[in-house]
Amino acid sequence: MTLIEKLENATRLTYEDGIALYDLDILTLGKYADKNRKERFGKKTYYNVNRHINPTNICKDVCQFCAYSASRKNPQQYTMTHDEIMNTVENSCKNGIKEVHIVSAHNPKAGLQWYLEIFSKIKAKYPHLHVKALTAAEIHFLSEEYNLTHENIIDLMIKNGVDSMPGGGAEIFDETVRKKICGGKVTSDQWIDIHRIWHNKGKQSNATMLFGHIESRADRIDHMIRLRELQDETNGFNAFIPLVYQKENNYLKVEDFPTAVEILKTFAISRLILDNIANLKAYWVTSSIKLALIAQEFGANDLDGTIEKESINSAAGASSSNGMAQNDFIDLIKNSGFEPIERDSLYNELN
Ligand code: V47
């Protein structure tokens, strides 16, 4: 069967097919990705009203792509107190947030209790707020620091009120590239195994892929296939989120950045390869809102949310530090020909 025949029949695509997809022209790829998206979601585009909180930027690891953690390039260290975090949540609740997305650096001084009490305090005061917190990278850091297993940490997260896991820390699974960009932190196999344990507890999570740096197209396809294999096993991933690499204030030397065409092709290919992950999120923070709106025609059915404040990607050059107003978000989706639907964190439709 030719590649086009496979696309016509929605046959599952192999690793080799994935690489060959990049040689198709963008409009052909867009046609099949859009067909798939429209069959599942029509013109609906999901967003949620959320708040990102990044409670500390002190990190024991040094990822070459990261501009957020305190270092020579960013000497402004901070660790929020629980009171500061609770005030932030209180203010955001007045804006109608449904989710807090809490991701931190790997701070050896903060203590396991400091991490866990963030969740238990929020949950005690706002039981209906969805707490999405701790990436697999943070779970691995905490397990090493406190001599506990990944499962021990996961059980503590659940006990303290974490509802779902964000998809961060996946970066690129290929071991050679991973060693160069973030050697020393959670390995690819550990990242996958942590999500497997989480899913086996009946919980859901997301998966990211950081692209547009030193990885190859083949590395991206390999990353997607490894996620697809876990999803076949557990069905615990809600969304796949390709993150476009931001280049400012970090240590990674990158010469060639992906063009808009390469980014849109990557969205379309994600939609086609990941036939078992329903939602494809165009995270406007890293793709820019303009490209995220276009990505709706290349397979994306979710634009993440209002965010309110964002520190990780904005430190590396993204213009996302103050999030986006909900009305602006809705208007942008409508004006691009799609139907904005507010969702909760587990993709139930709200409005
Ligand atoms: O894991 C760090 C990435 C991630 C840079 O699960 C960078 O719903 C681009 O995972 N350029 C954290 N990216 C953000 C994240 C996320 C975001 C939105 C939604 C969800 C979700 C998850 O940010 C890190 C890393 O891959 N990152 N530095 C950079 N220079």
Image: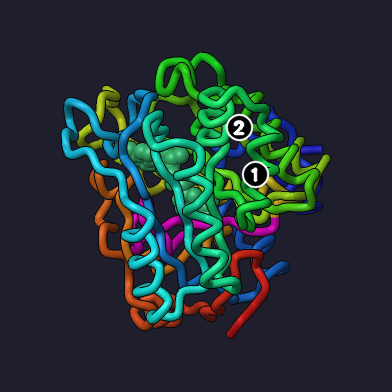
Magenta-tinted stretch:
278-295
Q: Eyeballing the image, is 115 above or below 303?
A: above
Q: Residue at x 31, y 34 (%)?
A: 58
Instruction: Judge depth for marks 2 and 1 and give the one in front.
Output: 1
Amino acid beneath label 2: His
Which quadrant of the view contains residue 170? top right
Classify mark 1: helix, strand or loop: helix
Q: Position of residue 225 (x, y in %)?
A: 69, 34
Q: Which mark is residue 223?
A: 2
The residues bearing labels 2 and 1 have C-alpha atoms spaced at a distance of: 29 Å
Q: Which mark is residue 302?
A: none
Query: In this view of the protein, can residue 170 be seen by the observer?
Result: no
Q: Residue at x 69, y 35 (%)?
A: 152
Near-viewer residue (227 or 36): 227
- The mark total stands at 2
Residue 239 is situated, as x and y percent measured from the top left of the image, at 62, 54
Provide the major secondary structure of the magenta segment.
helix
Magenta-colored stretch includes residue 343 = no
Q: Nearer the viewer, residue 284 or 159?
A: 159
Q: Amino acid at mark 1?
A: Leu
> Label 1 crowding class (10 Å Cα cut-off): few <14, some 14-19, many 20+?
some
**Which quadrant of the frame does ligand 1 lie within?**
top left
Q: Nearer the viewer, residue 54 or 161?
A: 161
For label 1, the residue is 156
The residue that appears at 31% across and 39% down in the rendered structure is 57
